[in-house]
Image (cartoon, rainbow, N blue to C red):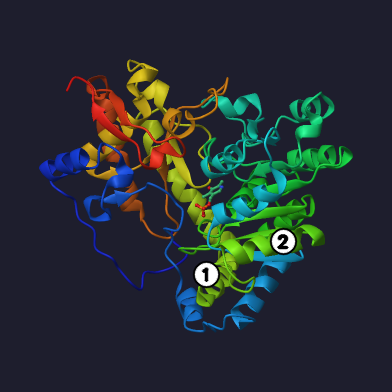
Amino acid sequence: MEPYRVKVVESISLPSREERERALQRAGYNLFNLLSEEVYVDLLTDSGTSAMSDRQWAGMMLGDEAYAGSRNFVHFESTVRELTGFPHVLPTHQGRAAEHLLFTQFAHRGDIVPSNMHFDTTRAHVLRVGAKPLNLAVPEAYDPASPHPFKGNLEVPKLVELLEGPSGASVRLVMVTITNNTGGGQPVSLANLREVSRVCHEHGKPLYLDICRWAENAYFIRSREPGQSDRSVPEIGREIFGLADGATMSAKKDGLVNIGGFVATRDEKLAARLKEDLILYEGFPTYGGLARRDLEAISIGLREASDERYLEHRIGQVRFLADLLSVGGVPIMQPPGGHGVYLDVPRFLPNLPADQLPGQALVVELYREGAIRTAEIGAIMFGDGETPPARSLELVRLAIPRRVYSESHLRYVAKVVRAVWARREAVRGLRMVEAPEHLRHFTARFAPLGH
Ligand SMILES: *Cc1c(COP(=O)(O)O)cnc(C)c1O
């Protein structure tokens, strides 16, 4: 059961069928355009949607809003240093701001940025400067039915081939995302991280980690990787961070806050350059685009997110929903990931061809059925700019916000998904009527086919 009890409640309600239909039309069939009030259970993202604890709220009241040298920054810096071992820590307003700072230093026109799998914002930052994002996840990552325990792993021989090949000089850094959000919230093993780190350092390339969900990843290592079950999550975390040169983090995930992030590094010279850009784009280094009280909430949240009782319940919730769907025959990405259940679109809607945007059609149908909001992670999110990747996934993500929903909410969600599954042959496709160039999933508009 939940290792917490409820102290504050927020009411939610189910809009009528007509209200849902009108909302879809107004939103151009893009659920990012819905009002939160039009949604009953919101599984759009687990980012910044966590419920903060009483201790975090108490911490907010201890905000020392000094422009420079706030005590909250001192607490934040010492917490991140202690958890990660990275000496230089720069707060940012969220994860993509940390990516902006890092890629401004490390990615230039013609460069290649390898990763296990780039997240949408990482990919967009790499593309923005004219560099090429390259996904090198293991083949199992692209097979939703494979039960491989670490589908977030990077395929090391491919990395070696790249670094030793003609394009090796175009690589200035290697990124690994833990857990791999785009690939289903799948973890990366410690063994894989050790190998990637060794290869990077043999070739003189720094290794940076996208550590949005490092605690969930460490929990999977503890429960699935041989020889790791006796170690604590923070202990595994310290080994992970020890293998890398630095990291970016959106604290909106495993920081259990509604806003915030950071970039951290061991490289003192780099830190000085990052700091100059930080001041220009985010703010003075002791607040980095945040209220100082937010830094206090992050310091407390980072520790709460690495608590094993919390993680056991959180990851258990994801598995609970996955099991309810699996027993109903719904095709999902296996094994279930750390922060959500991912529907396997090609098996869910085999009759809808790719040009009828089956992922988006499914997202729309789930809203129509029960006012649940989910996200397409597939052709619309990643089909812009570059030629489509050779191996791709078509997923719909049901992201579970942290400490927000109960088992009965998840039972409701499963009922809605299974109702759509039962009438899947009647789901109609969509076409895109407005498509911006970058990060188009946020703002594109669609229309139902046959209208
Ligand atoms: C959310 C996320 C980001 C970006 O963080 P924001 O706080 O949303 O800017 C980067 N990488 C991964 C893996 C993420 O999930």
Q: Secondary structure at mark 2?
A: helix
Residue on which disc 1 sits: 290
Q: Nearer the viewer, residue 155 or 412?
A: 155
Other-residue count near label 2 (Cα within 10 Å), few / some / many at <14 / 14–19 / ≥20: many
Q: Nearer the viewer, residue 282 or 369?
A: 282
Other-residue count near label 1 (Cα within 10 Å), few / some / many at <14 / 14–19 / ≥20: some
Q: Farthest residue toward the left?
A: 18
Left or right of 11 in this view: 114: right
Q: Nearer the viewer, residue 89 or 418?
A: 89
- Frontmost of labels 1 and 2 is 1
Label 1 and label 2: CA atoms lie apart by 21 Å
At x 77%, y 50%, the residue is 244
Q: Tell me residue 206's x, y (percent).
A: 79, 46
Residue on which disc 2 sits: 84
Three-letter code for the amino acid on which mark 1 is drawn:
Leu
At x 54%, y 40%, the residue is 124
Q: Tell me residue 241's x, y (percent).
A: 74, 54
* Labels 1 and 2 touching (C-beta < 8 A): no
Mark 1 vs 2, N-terminal side: 2
Does 338 sit above or below residue 138? below
Q: Secondary structure at mark 1?
A: loop
Question: Is label 1's Cβ within 8 Å of ligand 1?
Answer: no
Q: Which quarter of the image is occupied by the C terminus?
A: top left
In this view of the protein, can residue 229 be seen by the observer? yes
At x 86%, y 41%, the residue is 204
Residue 422 in which image quadrant: top left
Q: Nearer the viewer, residue 221 or 18?
A: 18
